Amino acid sequence: MDAGSGGGRLPFVGLTGAMAAGKTEALQALERLGAATVSSDAIVHELLGEESLRDLLVERFGRRVAPDGQVDRAAVAEVVFGEEEARDWLESQLWPRVGERIAAWREELAERGQPPRAAVVEVPLLFEAGMETGFDATVAIVAEDPLREQRAGARGHAGVDSRARRQLPQGEKARRADYVVDNDGDLADLETKMSQVLDEVTA
């Protein structure tokens, strides 16, 4: 892929990785380094707060997914977990809306007098959703399994394996990505590595 910024084009980068590998920390590092960043999960969170989507969810799944008039994300997850048809329907409602938000954000960035070094979107299911072709470059954050388990536990999450069934193995994510960052060190080490990737993407 052409990840350069020739002709003033703003590099568009997809960031992904295994659960608890450090995607959020990598995204924050890129922002400190001069990139504009957004998380697809954050966009989904915003969308689930909108009445139009809430009404669609209630119509499909019943009041249990919005018992107090607000979408209960845990209840939605429980409904769609293991139900491929329900999950596919939910994604068919969410992903086009997420795409529209990201496109508008990207356009706004490009029109700035001083655009950022790059526009980076964190997408946990980037390869699983077949979205990689929409980016100039893709970055996968990886870490050793014991370290990911430790990080997940520290955040109060259940084991990595049980929560990652929907995701490709991190080795496959790494194979598909244009850049792979091993996040087995501290935050300073991660930021150094992200700086190197950003330099290459914007070269």
Image: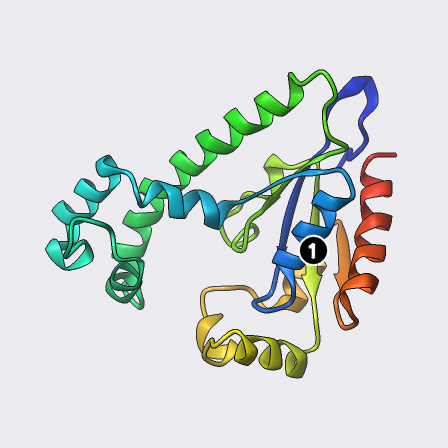
In the foreground, 161 or 76 = 76
Picture coordinates of residue 149, whole percent (x, y) = 59, 80
Could you tell whether 142 is left or right of 196 in the image? left
Give the quadrant of the N terminus.
top right
Q: Quadrant of residue 199?
A: top right
Q: Which residue is mark 1?
A: 26
Picture coordinates of residue 70, whole percent (x, y) = 22, 50
Picture coordinates of residue 143, whole percent (x, y) = 70, 71
Against 120, is 76 above or below?
Answer: below
How many marks are shown on the rendered structure?
1
In the foreground, 84 or 19 = 19
Against 140, is 13 above or below?
Answer: above
Q: Quadrant of residue 145?
A: bottom right
Give the quadrant of the C terminus.
top right
Could you tell whether 41 is left or right of 20 in the image? left
Picture coordinates of residue 122, whole percent (x, y) = 59, 48
Could you tell whether 139 is left or right of 125 in the image? right
Question: How would you rate the neighbour count of disc 1 (Cα within 10 Å): few for under 14, some for 14-19, many for 20 or more?
Answer: many
In the foreground, 152 or 13 = 152
Against 194, is 145 above or below?
Answer: below
Residue at image point 40% right, 35% down: 96
Q: What coloring was used for the rendering?
A: rainbow
- Kindly state the secondary structure of the residue where label 1 is placed: helix
Residue at image point 47% right, 75% down: 157
Which amino acid, by three-letter code, is at mark 1? Ala
